Amino acid sequence: MLFATELMSAAVYDPQSHFVGRVREFFVEPAEQPNRVSHFLISRGRFQPLIARYDQVEKVGPGRIDLNVSERALAAYTPNEAWLAVRKDLLDQQIIDTEGRKVVRVNDVDLSEFRTNNHVELRITRVDVGLPGAVRRLLQGVAPSALVRKFQTRLPQRSIRWEFVNLIEPDPLRRVKLRITHEKLEDLHPADLAEMMEELSPAERQGIIASLDEETAAAVLAELDERLTTQIVEKLDPEKAADILEEMAPDAAADLLADLPKETTEEILEEMPNQEAREARHLLAFDPSTAGGMMNTDYAYVGEKSTREEVLQWMRNQDLNLEQLDTIVLVDSHAQFSGTVPVARMLLAAPEQHMSDLKTEPLISVTADASEKDVFELFDKYNLRMLTVLDETNHPIGTITVDDVVSRLVNA
């Protein structure tokens, strides 16, 4: 096992033991091999820096690298944005530990040797985010490597396997060149990812949201602080922002649009499909502190004369958010509100039982102009999980869930 700090400033020699220079940086080329050290940057005084490829390295040890070629075989160094620089892009940088679900700072990088034919390859195996790595950095060039290694064994170890590391790169062009994806982040719970993103800089947050798929980005934005969400969406390309808002619940999308500058809101609405844009404009017309401003227009409703089996069959063919589907709204033959049925009660009913026989009592609803205070009181008084919002003709136009209430109270 070697450490990146032990190779920085390491002396480099050719096969005849002639001094070539010292290592100033080394690189990984993700497009070729995601964890192999592909190139070493070598400099010596005023001479032009040189590059040694991984297959030109014969032997590696703390403080020394031996080549299997002469200095003349080395190429002159030219910058390449498709290379990940260990010192510049990893050491002291913040990364996301996808296994531990936290943001950490890299103190050192652990490397393993692999002998291949007539050369040695170095592979990144772990990143050190604990005290040993910090101590190695502090004592680099001050104490012998053997002494530092002996001392560090007494310290608590904290490291992350390379496959669980998610690099943060705000520049979209460089992300592509480095082949940095956020597929690992998309597997995290949105609340965990949102919490980690709050620890990052604005540019880093922007880079992550811009590269997530729209569904994941929408879920993460719903968990972020409203101020941060507004800042992120305002800087997104309107088309990308519209794609993300399409994946959000209509009420959440409308709340977000209401916080944006009017010009930005209009640009995003222009990019949204007609139906989603109409829903958003409809919700934006309500006072945010009323039931209309809190409601979600995306809800499930069926005729009260439907049987339990008919409703289940209908639900199987709909694109419903099953994680949030708790209650179904009932309407009569005139499409007016007639009650609600908890999904759990419906599932336990007989297949031929009508929905009207399953509705809860008393019949509770609010009009769109009801104050949020009235809404809170109803949820508290009747221990509701969902409340139906009606228009002036008694037609349901949306619902308010307990999640909406909790979110409003938390952000009040």
Image (cartoon, rainbow, N blue to C red):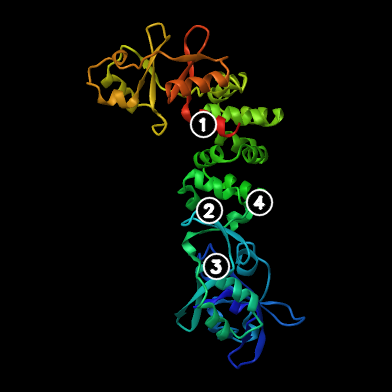
Q: Position of residue 158 (x, y in %)?
A: 50, 67
In this rendering, the answer to whether 193 lies above or below 77 is above
Q: Tell me, yes or no, if residue 249 can be seen here.
A: no
Instruction: Give the side of residue 12 with respect to residue 327, left or right.
Output: right
Q: How many marks?
A: 4
Q: Which residue is mark 1?
A: 406
State which tag comes first along the sequence, 1 or 2. 2
Identify the amino acid type marked 2.
Thr
In this rendering, the answer to whether 196 lies above or below 235 is below
| Classed neighbour count for the residue bearing mark 3: other residues with Cα under 10 Å, few (<14), some (14–19), many (≥20) | some
Question: Which residue does the image show at 52% across and 40% down from the upper left?
Answer: 214
**Spatial distance from mark 2 to mark 4, Cα to Cα?**
18 Å
Label disc, if present, on residue 130 of the rendered structure: 3
**Spatial distance from mark 4 to mark 1, Cα to Cα?**
28 Å
Question: Which residue does the image show at 56% across and 34% down from the upper left?
Answer: 410
| Classed neighbour count for the residue bearing mark 4: other residues with Cα under 10 Å, few (<14), some (14–19), many (≥20) | few
| Classed neighbour count for the residue bearing mark 1: other residues with Cα under 10 Å, few (<14), some (14–19), many (≥20) | few
Quarter occupied by residue 72: bottom right
Q: Position of residue 237 (x, y in %)?
A: 64, 39
Label disc, if present, on residue 181 of the rendered structure: 2
Identify the amino acid type marked 1.
Val
**Spatial distance from mark 1 to mark 2, Cα to Cα?**
34 Å
State which tag comes first along the sequence, 2 or 4. 2
**Spatial distance from mark 1 to mark 3, Cα to Cα?**
38 Å
| SS type, badge 2 | loop
| SS type, badge 1 | helix
Q: Position of residue 341 (x, y in %)?
A: 35, 20
Identify the amino acid type marked 3.
Gly
